[in-house]
Amino acid sequence: MAPKVSKEHINQRRADILEAAKQVFCKKGFEPTTMKDVVDASGMSRGGVYQYFPNTEEMMRAILEDGMIEFNHHLSNLLSRHEQVWHAINEYIDLHKNAPSDHFGIVTYEYFVTCWRNHERRNYLQHRYSFGINYFIQFIQTGVDRGQFKPLQPVSVIAKFMMNVLDGLLLEQSLVNLNDQEKEDQYDALRFYLRTVLQINDKRMQKE
Amino acid sequence: MAPKVSKEHINQRRADILEAAKQVFCKKGFEPTTMKDVVDASGMSRGGVYQYFPNTEEMMRAILEDGMIEFNHHLSNLLSRHEQVWHAINEYIDLHKNAPSDHFGIVTYEYFVTCWRNHERRNYLQHRYSFGINYFIQFIQTGVDRGQFKPLQPVSVIAKFMMNVLDGLLLEQSLVNLNDQEKEDQYDALRFYLRTVLQINDKRMQKE
DNA sequence: TATTAAAATGACACCTATGTCGTTATTATA
DNA sequence: TATAATAACGACATAGGTGTCATTTTAATA
């Protein structure tokens, strides 16, 4: 006989569980969250949840994947939408700056900061990291190709530095008390570095 | 009657437990480490360890405090040892760069990255953060006072940015595969930013 | 050497999460 | 409407960590 429920139903169920899991993660953090927590939050039965995910690790991974897809969707065509690459970079930075202020960002850090003791998790982080770096490299290289940047350091070094700073800022915002001005100042400092090291070619650009 | 053992004995015992705890932390990470782990690693009895520390949180805190004292010891008189503040900053950066490569650095991050769900831990991080920032501010301000720097951004902003970058680099080194050259490049990028934003006044300094 | 404060021991009862599995409810097909 | 595949349920046995406490050992003093 054919399968018992529709694909949509399965997907919905899965999404419900992930929604519940994300809520618990945001409230308790990743490590302390137990399968029991998610079961309770989802309103489903123990066996029911286990049918979809064997542990919180898989749930987290699934949430991250979904988030990645959404993030890429936001960024799609970024470079083709801006003649000035510097504007594209600023849009990226702004998107980063205005990330949702739930705890999920910091929970993601918690998840990755422990990857040194989990091979699979480490590989996954490495993959994400490379992806992010390549994104930035592509940005900068496009600026160089269009004759807008004349970088004083290797493009890959600048890309890594940018990523490092952005990650650090998200962390900093979540953990220590920074007011809006201090936050803005830090992003300004990043822009200052980028403007300087990229030697942006257009006078108009340097103001913003 | 007088107390049963000497102060030295108590301190030694305490130090032994912390040594064992640190080893377990480095091997397993902070969260997964149980009191049982530390008891087993220390070779003491359950009750014996509990007489000194009620949980792993207190152990971690004690280890951090000891480390802080040692770090300050390394840095003592840094500013008075260098006429050129830029050299002092570089010594600081080098000390950071050559931090021991055991896992304790990253375990410390794990500990602090979860502080948003633990008030006491958060206060402690805030205290540490302020301390670090003030250290950097003092550096830069001294350079300004000595007429060596002409910063293009507020001193406190530069200090925070520097701290952010250094923290990020430690994290990056621990989690993703960076070879020595890439690592060096990232520290160079930080120095590039600092040289530029501080407008170091002495031509000789700008080379190194 | 005898005394005694307290350091150290380890067994114990309690608690909570885990993963499984036999049973029940559900729904797409015949 | 009957049926059969399977989604969903929830009780259960297991495992491991926790904090305590009565008991034993230790070493500074008298």
Image: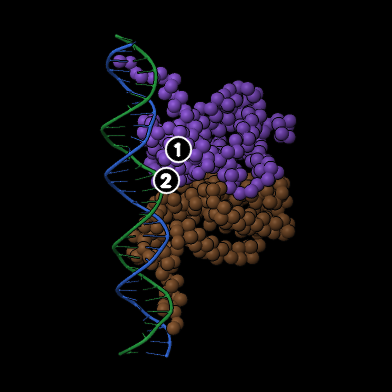
Chain colours: A purple, B brown, C green, D blue
Q: Quadrant of residue D1?
A: top left
Q: Compared with residue B7, is residue B94 higher up or lower down, i.e. above or below?
A: above
> Where is mark 1, residue-wise?
A40
Question: Distance from label 1 to label 2 (Cα)?
Answer: 30 Å
Q: x and y percent of residue B1 in the render? A: 44, 83
Q: Tag 1: residue type?
A: Asp
Question: CB under 8 Å between callouts 1 and 2?
Answer: no
Decide which of A163, B15 is in the foreground and name it.
B15
Mark 1 closeness class: few <14, some 14–19, many ≥20 residues within 10 Å: some
- Image side of residue A203 versus residue A154, left or right: right
Q: x and y percent of residue A203 in the render? A: 73, 32
On residue B162, the disc is: none
On residue A116, the disc is: 2
Q: Compared with residue B6, is residue A45 higher up or lower down, i.e. above or below?
A: above
Residue at position x 58%, y 41% in the image: A170
Q: Compared with residue A9, is residue B83 higher up or lower down, i.e. above or below?
A: below
- Image side of residue A93 versus residue B175, left or right: right
Residue at position x 45%, y 63% in the image: B53
* Closer to viewer: mark 1 or mark 2: 1
Indicate the secondary structure of the residue bearing disc 1: helix
Mark 2 closeness class: few <14, some 14–19, many ≥20 residues within 10 Å: many
Q: Tag 2: residue type?
A: Trp
Residue at position x 45%, y 71% in the image: B11
Indicate the secondary structure of the residue bearing disc 2: helix
Q: x and y percent of residue B98 in the render? A: 49, 55
In primary-sequence order, the first of circles 1 and 2 is 1
